[in-house]
Image (cartoon, rainbow, N blue to C red):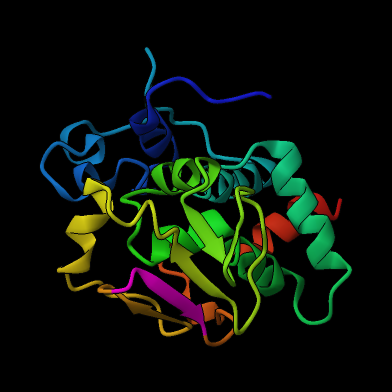
Amino acid sequence: MAKYINADCRLCRREGTKLFLKGERCTSKKCAIERRVGAPGVHPTTRKKASEYAIQLREKQKVKRAYGLLEKQFRAVYDRAVQMRGKTGETMLSLLERRLDNVVYRLGLGSSRAQARQIVNHRHVTVNGKIVNIPSYTVKVGDVIAVKETSAKKAPFEGIKDSRVIVPKWLEFEPAKLTGKVIALPARDDIDLTIQEHLIIERYSK
């Protein structure tokens, strides 16, 4: 399977915004966006006006990289959203938010989506009492997401039990039990990343 292996901070600099790919580092003075202005490379700036295609492409790349997906995975989410009722753009974002790795991240069980994906892959997470190790698994309203009982005793999770975790309003979380629940579908205003989804829809619909 293809995998991005270069520096994550280069992605943030390329998109010109924080994608929160490195956990706590992104909120510290070490953040690449804070230290270095402009896109990575020998010629980070350009005077050429971006075309309509370039603007649409950059928006797609930004969202794709924020959620840690490859092109084929991201396109599959879009195709699935097209077949569902409602506005395609908002439905697509809802599907991205309901990925299991993203939910684990939103619950504070991982400091970044990449770490949350690793937690899921290593079989530390259960959904409705059953182990699920598929990061792309789509959670539904009423699903209970929890850290496996044997994993809950490990150091990374022990520290979360005594912390105060702020989660989106469509989720509930009990730190002491390391258990979360999906109480509603994520609404458009629950997305904290600045996204112009209509540009992505225009890019794919051509």
Q: Residue at x 52, y 42 (%)?
A: 65
Give the left or right position of residue 197, taking residue 27 as reference.
right
- Numbered range of the magenta stretch: 177-182
Mark yes or no: residue 194 visible. no
Total numbered labels: 0
In the rendered structure, the answer to whether residue 85 lies left or right of residue 118 reads right
What is the chief secondary structure element of the magenta stretch?
Answer: strand
Question: Is residue 197 at least partly visible in the picture?
Answer: yes
The answer to whether residue 99 is above or below residue 12 is below
Q: Position of residue 171 (x, y in %)?
A: 45, 80
What is the quadrant of residue 185 in the picture? Answer: bottom right
Q: Closer to the camera, 126 or 82?
A: 126
Is 180 magenta? The answer is yes
Q: Nearer the viewer, residue 97 or 141?
A: 141
Question: Is residue 122 left or right of 169 when viewed as pictured?
Answer: right
Judged from this view, the residue extending furthest toward the top is 42
Q: Relative to residue 110, is residue 173 depicted above or below?
A: below
Tell me what residue is drawn at x 17 percent, y 57 percent.
159
Q: Is residue 53 above or below residue 109?
A: above
Q: Quadrant of residue 9?
A: top left
Q: Quick check: is 108 in the magenta stretch?
A: no
x and y percent of residue 151 in the render?
37, 51
Residue at 27% over, 73% down: 175
Give the residue at the far front of this rendering.
150
Residue at the extreme left of the image, as rendered: 29
Looking at the picture, does residue 182 appear above or below residue 42? below
Residue at position x 51%, y 48% from top? Answer: 120
Residue 77 on image: x %, y %: 74, 55
Instruction: State the residue in front, 26 or 154.
Output: 154
Q: Percent position (x, y) of residue 88?
A: 76, 71
Q: Quadrant of the N terminus?
A: top right
